[in-house]
Amino acid sequence: MTTEAVPRVAVVGCGRWGRNLARDFKALGALEAIVEVDPAVSAALAAAHGCRALGLDEALADPSIDGIVIAAPAALHHPLAKRALAAGKHVFVEKPLALSVEDGEELVALAEQAGRCLMVGHLLHYHPAFLALKEFVASDALGKLSYVYSNRLSLGALRHEEDVLWSFAPHDISMILALAGEAPEQVAAFSAPTLHPGIGDVVQLQLAFANGIKGHVFCSWLHPFKEQRLVVVGERGMAVFEDSAADPAGKLRFYDHKIAWTNGVPKTLKGDGAPLPYGSGNPLMEECRHFLEAIANGTSPRTDGHEALAVLSVLERATGDMKSRLSEDGTAAGSPEAPSYPGVTIHESAYVDAGVSIGPGTRIWHFSHILDEVSLGRNCNIGQNVAIGPRVTIGDGVKIQNNVSIYEGVELEDGVFCGPSCVFTNVNTPRAEISRKHQFRKTLVKRGATIGANATIVCGHELGSYCFIAAGAVVTRDVPAFALMAGVPAVRIGWVGHAGVKLGPDLVCPETGRTYRESGPDTLEEVV
C-alpha cells in the first residue's frame, strides 16, 4: 500500500479510545477528519492532528473520505454504522458490532450489498502474541484442547449504559472462538450487579463446545489490579497469553505440564515454563493498518462482520441467561433452581440439574455441578468446582472440599469428610474409546469417614465407619471401621476414634476419653 494509495478515514467519537484510533490513523497518514459531538473537543483534536473537524453529515457526504471509524458508545454502533454503509463508506466499528444479533445481521447484509468493508475492533486478533499462540495451537503442539479460560480484570473504567460482559468480554470470546474453531453449544453467564441494579460489574461466562472444549471468561471492573490472561490447556501442555505482563518476554509462555493416568488414577507431571517467540508490532496500529489494507485491496478483514456476529451471538445468549438469574429489582438471584430448595444456599455460578433432591441447610459453592438424580442430604457443605452425579446418594452433614468429583457408583453416608482434590474412580480399566458404564463398581463410604487431600479411592471397596484415609493415600481394598490408612497402596498404620484422633496403645481417645478394644486382628469396636 503506497502513500498515495492510503485510504482516508474520519474517526467518529473521540473519547478515551477514539483518541487512540485518531492518533494511529494519523501516524499511518490516513486521518482526514474528526467527528465529535463537542465542537471544542473536535476543533482541538483536529488542530492537534492536522486534520478537519466535521459534523457527521459532512463526513458522510465527503467523497474524499473512504472509511468511517466508529468509537462511540455501544448503543450508537448500529445506527452510526448503518448510516455510514448507506452513504457508501467502508466501516470500522469498535466492539461490540451492535447490541443484538438482529442489528448485527442487518449491518453485515448492508455491507455485502454495498460491496463495502465492515470490520470490528477485536483488537487481540492483531496482537503478535495471540497470532503466535494461534499458530502454536494449529501446529498441534498442545495436542487436543480441553479447556480455554480468560481473566480480564481491572479497577474501572465503570459504565452505567452497558455491563462488564459487553464492555470487556468481546475480546476474550473472540479469542476463544478462534481457538475452538466453532460456536459453543452451551452458554451460561452469572452476573453480580453492585453499583447499578441490572448492570453486572462482575461476570462469569461458561462455554461448552461440541468438540469437547470448555471455555470460561471472568470479567470484572471491580478488581484491585489489572489482569489480562488467556490460558489454553491441551493434552501435551499449557500455553498462557498474559497481555498484562510487564515484561514482553513473559506475555506468551508454554508450560510442559501433563496429566498421566496409572490404573485409572490421574497424576500431575509438572514441566518447565518457557517463553514462546512472537513478532513485534503495536496491536492497535496493526489493526488500523489492516483496515486500510482491506479497503485498498478489496479484501475481507480478519475480524469481519461474520466474525463479529459469532461473538455477538454468544453475548446475546449470555445476556439472556444472566437475566434469567436476576430478581425483579435487578440484583443477583442465584441459579434458577435455588428457589425450589428452601433453606439451601446455591452460589450463582453453580449448576443444579433437574431431578435433584437437596436437604435444608446445605450450601453449594462456586462452579460446582450437581447432576440429575442426585440425593444430597441436610447441612452439607459442597466446596468449589465439585461435580456430583449422576445418580449419587450423599447423606447428611457431609463436607466435600474443592475440586472433588463424586461419580455414579459412589455413596457417602452421613458425616463423611472429603478433602481437597481427593479422587474416586468407578471403573477399573477406563478407556476413552471404550464405553464401560456397565462396569461401574460401587464404592460405599460409611458414616463419619475422613478422606484426606489428594487421596485416591479405587472403586469397588467399602470404607468403614469413622476410618481415616491419610492425604495422598491410595485405597485398593476394603477399609475396616476406625482404621488409620496411609501409603501407596494404603495399609493400616493404627486406629482412630470417633473424633478422628489417633489412638495410643491403651486404645483410649485422648480427646474424648472414649474407650475401644480390638475384637479381632483387623477389627476395632467401642467399649460401651
Image: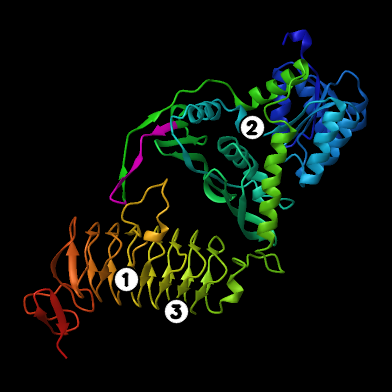
Query: Element at badge 3?
Result: loop
Cα gap from disc 3 to disc 2, whole angstroms:
49 Å
Q: Please determine whether, in this image, residue 86 is positioned above or below residue 472.
A: above
The x, y position of residue 181, in whole percent, is 59, 36
Q: Please determine whether, in this image, residue 162 is positioned above or below residue 305.
A: below
User: Which residue is most to the bottom?
Assistant: 528
Q: In the rendered image, which quarter contains the C terminus?
A: bottom left
Q: Which residue is mark 1?
A: 444
Magenta span of residues: 253-264
Residue 461 in which image quadrant:
bottom left
88 and 413: which one is in front?
A: 413
Q: Amino acid at mark 3?
A: Arg
Local packing at callout 2 (Cα closer than 10 Å; few below 14, some 14-19, many 20+) is many
Name the side, left or right, on which 471 lies relative to 380.
Answer: left
Name the side, left or right, on which 318 lies relative to 275.
Answer: right
The x, y position of residue 8, in whole percent, is 81, 19
Query: Element at badge 1?
Result: strand
Query: Element at badge 2?
Result: helix
Magenta-colored segment: predominant secondary structure: strand
The x, y position of residue 158, in whole percent, is 66, 49
Local packing at callout 3 (Cα closer than 10 Å; few below 14, some 14-19, many 20+) is many
Q: Which mark is residue 266?
A: none
Does the magenta portion include 263? Answer: yes
Q: Which mark is residue 378?
A: 3
Mark 2–mark 1 CB contact (< 8 Å):
no
454 and 391: which one is in front?
A: 391
Does the magenta portion include 184? Answer: no
Cα gap from disc 2 to disc 1, whole angstroms:
53 Å
Q: Which residue is mark 2?
A: 123
Name the side, left or right, on which 430 lies relative to 73.
Answer: left
201 and 50: which one is in front?
A: 201
